[in-house]
Amino acid sequence: MQGHRSVRPDVGSFFRYHKPGAGFDFRELAITAGAAVAFAVAIMWCGPDSSSNPMDKDGFLFRLTVGLRKIDGNWRITHEHHSVPATD
């Protein structure tokens, strides 16, 4: 399918800032699904000493949003976004 790309490069760019073995926990999860489109929104916790950023030494919360489409009978990730709370 044209325009479709693998999510793997995005995941790689997210995880390159985290140490191997980093723990991730779901704190909240909401899923909205229809016949051909779905979204999952989660508040997640990345465990202590998992980040290469010294400010995150005790761990940190982040939001994960994933959009999916059913294409040829299979669910495909078509959007993924990670964000952290603003500090200002």
Image (spheres, grey):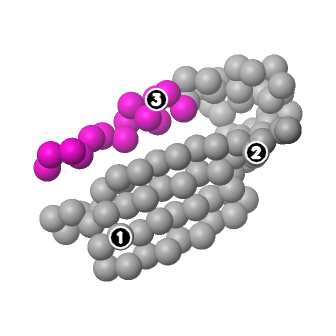
Q: CA distance from mark 2 to mark 1?
A: 27 Å
- Looking at the rendered image, the disc whose residue lies closer to the viewer, 3 or 2, is 2
Q: CA distance from mark 3 to mark 2?
A: 21 Å
Dot 2 alpha-carbon crowd within 10 angstroms: few under 14, some 14 to 19, many 20 or more: few
Which residue shows up at 68% across the image and 56% down it? 43
Badge count: 3
Q: What's the amino acid at mark 2?
A: Pro
Numbered circle sitting on residue 12: 3
Which residue shows up at 15% across the image and 65% down it? 72
Counting residues from the N terminus, which is met first, the one under dot 3 or under dot 1?
A: 3
Q: Which residue is mark 1?
A: 37
Q: Residue furthest bottom?
A: 35
Q: Nearer the viewer, residue 45 or 3?
A: 3
- Looking at the rendered image, the disc whose residue lies closer to the viewer, 3 or 1, is 1
Is residue 9 a member of the stretch shown in magenta? yes
Secondary structure beneath label 1: strand
Q: What's the amino acid at mark 1?
A: Val
Q: Is residue 25 above or below residue 84?
A: below
Which segment is the magenta one?
A: 1-14
Q: What's the amino acid at mark 3?
A: Gly
Which residue shows up at 65% across the image and 51% down it? 63
Residue 69: quadrant of the picture: bottom left
